[in-house]
Amino acid sequence: MPLRFHNGQGSPMSISTTISTSLAGVQAGMNRTAIAGSRISMNANDASALARNMVEQMEDAHQVKMSANVIKTADEMLGAIIDVRA
């Protein structure tokens, strides 16, 4: 039986689903960060494009960080459940 917890909106989620979703969030954020970095280097002379891409890069970095925090929390929860069951 999969371990489940609530996502704060009343819907149960398994820890493996949460980790998979968060890993996808990390990957997507890293990909978009790289794209924004490439755009920054290509648009170095356009101030508005530079600012827009820097903001996008910062947003993507926050997404990666938050997704990593979710993975860390799910890992801690799984460890606690294993400790309780052991």
Image (spheres, rainbow, N blue to C red):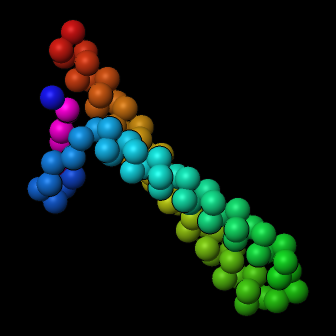
Q: Which residue, as the protein is rendered here, is positioned at the far front?
A: 1
x and y, in percent, of residue 70 in the image: 39, 46
Residue 33, located in which quarter of the rendered image? bottom right
| In-image side of 49 versus 57 (left or right) | right
| Residue numbers of the magenta segment | 2-6
Q: Is residue 61 visible?
A: no
Tell me which residue sits at (62%, 65%) in the image: 32
> Magenta region, mostly helix, strand or loop?
strand
Tell me which residue sits at (42%, 49%) in the image: 22
> Which quadrant, please, contains the N terminus?
top left
Queried whether the magenta region covers residue 56, the answer comes back as: no
x and y, in percent, of residue 26 in the image: 52, 52
| In-image side of 14 versus 36 (left or right) | left
x and y, in percent, of residue 49 in the image: 73, 86
x and y, in percent, of residue 4 in the image: 18, 38
Queried whether the magenta region covers residue 3, the answer comes back as: yes
Tell me which residue sits at (70%, 68%) in the image: 35
Tell me which residue sits at (40%, 45%) in the image: 20
Q: Is residue 23 visible?
A: yes
Q: 26 and 57: which one is in front?
A: 26
17 in relation to 85, above or below: below
Q: Which residue, as the protein is rendered here, is positioned at the far top?
A: 86
